[in-house]
């Protein structure tokens, strides 16, 4: 078993989402993670984490 921990992209703490840079970081992470055989995702309920994971789940 392999566990991969991914930190959220650059956050906008005031809006609990990602900045423009954070969205790009999330997309880059999604491109990398899409190449792996991932069986499960565990994600924080915070918006910035949900947004980051959402990019990968769409791929």
Image: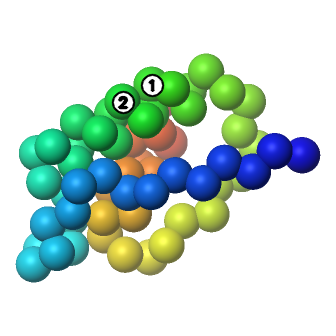
Helix, strand or loop under label 1? helix
Using the image, determine if residue 7 lies above or below residue 20: below
Report which residue position mark 2 lands on: 28
Residue that sits furthest to the top in the current view: 35
Q: Which residue is mark 1?
A: 31
Depicted 40 relative to depicted 47: above or below = above
x, y percent for residue 49: 39, 63
Q: Relative to the observer, which residue lies in front, 5 or 27?
A: 5
Whether residue 39 sits left or right of residue 4 in the image: it is right
Instruction: Tell me the SS state at disc 2.
Output: helix
Count of numbered circles in the view: 2
Q: Is residue 58 visible?
A: no
Marks 1/2: CA distance?
5 Å
Q: Position of residue 53 (x, y in %)?
A: 45, 51
Above or below for 44 versus 59: below
What number is the disc on residue 54?
none
Q: Quadrant of residue 11?
A: bottom left
Farthest residue in the right direction?
1
Residue occupying the point 62% across, 63% down: 42
Q: What residue sits 37% from the left and 75% below the top?
A: 46
Task: Write down the quadrant of residue 30 in the picture.
Answer: top left
Question: Residue 17: horizontal and vertical position, in percent?
Answer: 21, 64
Disc 1 to disc 2: CB gap under 8 Å: yes
**Residue 29 coordinates in the image, percent (x, y):** 43, 35
Q: Indicate left or right for 45 with 47 as reference.
A: right
């Amino acid at each position: 078993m392999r566990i991969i921990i991914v930190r959220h992209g650059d956050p906008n703490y005031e809006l609990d989402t990602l900045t423009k840079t954070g969205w790009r970081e999330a997309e880059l992470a999604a491109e990398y993670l899409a190449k792996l055989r991932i069986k499960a995702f565990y994600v924080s309920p915070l918006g910035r984490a949900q947004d980051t994971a959402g990019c990968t789940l769409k791929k």
